[in-house]
Amino acid sequence: MTEQGVSPELLKERLEREPCAGAMHLLAETYYQQGQYPQAATVSRQALSRYPENLELRLLLGQSLASLGEYDEAEEILKPLVEEIAHLGEAFNTLDHLYQGQGRAAAAQQAGELYRLLLAGLAALFKGEEPLVPPPAPPPAEDDRRRRHLARTLAALEKWRQALQSN
């Protein structure tokens, strides 16, 4: 087991029995957080071949490719994600109006602000003012990487827990 409580070997075993999107994502994320970008890209590609609509897998593959310096391929992988984010912006705009109608001014303001920030960022991106794949930042300290991985793992587990409770 790693310090985060996730072992790539255990995840690989799980994938052999049942190749679910969650386990594939967790394995790719573990490789990525450990700086094993080629393995992260390989697992992400395999997962996307099974689950092509999974945006988290697409993002992880794009991040892995960018970390490997494969910027053109990373950009192609991330373009559909940017289109999905543009649609997400409309959801924030709708929430803004919905919350206003409910008299929830603070929630409406927050949704409206997210909508405006998203539109401004996408407009700059589409005008070519911002690169789709920024140059890689220096790798974070190992402790920061472990904390972020643990936080992402816990967030994913919480999503699954909530989804199971709603069924």
Image: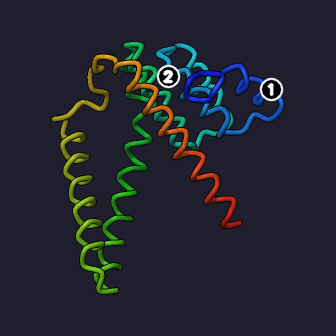
What amino acid type should be assigned to the residue bearing mark 2?
Tyr
Residue occupying the point 40% across, 23% down: 143
Which part of the image, by quadrant, shows the N terminus?
Answer: top right
Residue assigned mark 1? 16
Distance in Å between CA atoms under marks 1 and 2: 20 Å
Mark 1 crowdedness (10 Å alpha carbons): few <14, some 14-19, many ≥20: few
Q: Is residue 94 rendered to the left or right of residue 65?
A: left
Residue 1 to residue 105: above or below: above
Residue occupying the point 48% across, 32% down: 149
Residue occupying the point 56% across, 24% down: 3
Q: Is residue 50 rendered to the left or right of residue 66?
A: right
Mark 2 crowdedness (10 Å alpha carbons): few <14, some 14-19, many ≥20: many
Query: Is 61 in front, or is 84?
Result: 61
What amino acid type should be assigned to the residue bearing mark 1?
Glu
Whether tag 1 and tag 2 are in contact, CB under 8 A, the answer is: no
Residue assigned mark 2? 32
What x and y, as percent, mark residue 122?
25, 46
What secondary structure is marked by label 2?
helix
- The residue at the far right in this view is 17
Q: Is residue 144 rendered to the left or right of residue 124?
A: right
Q: Which mark is residue 143?
A: none
Query: Is 99 in front, or is 152?
Result: 152
- The residue at the far left in this view is 129
Colouring used for the render: rainbow
Q: Earlier in the sequence, mark 1 or mark 2?
A: 1
- Give the quadrant of residue 148: top left
What x and y, as percent, mark residue 14?
77, 30
Q: How many marks?
A: 2
What x and y, as percent, mark residue 36?
51, 14
Which part of the image, by quadrant, shows the C terminus?
Answer: bottom right
What secondary structure is marked by label 1?
helix
Residue 123 to residue 164: above or below: above
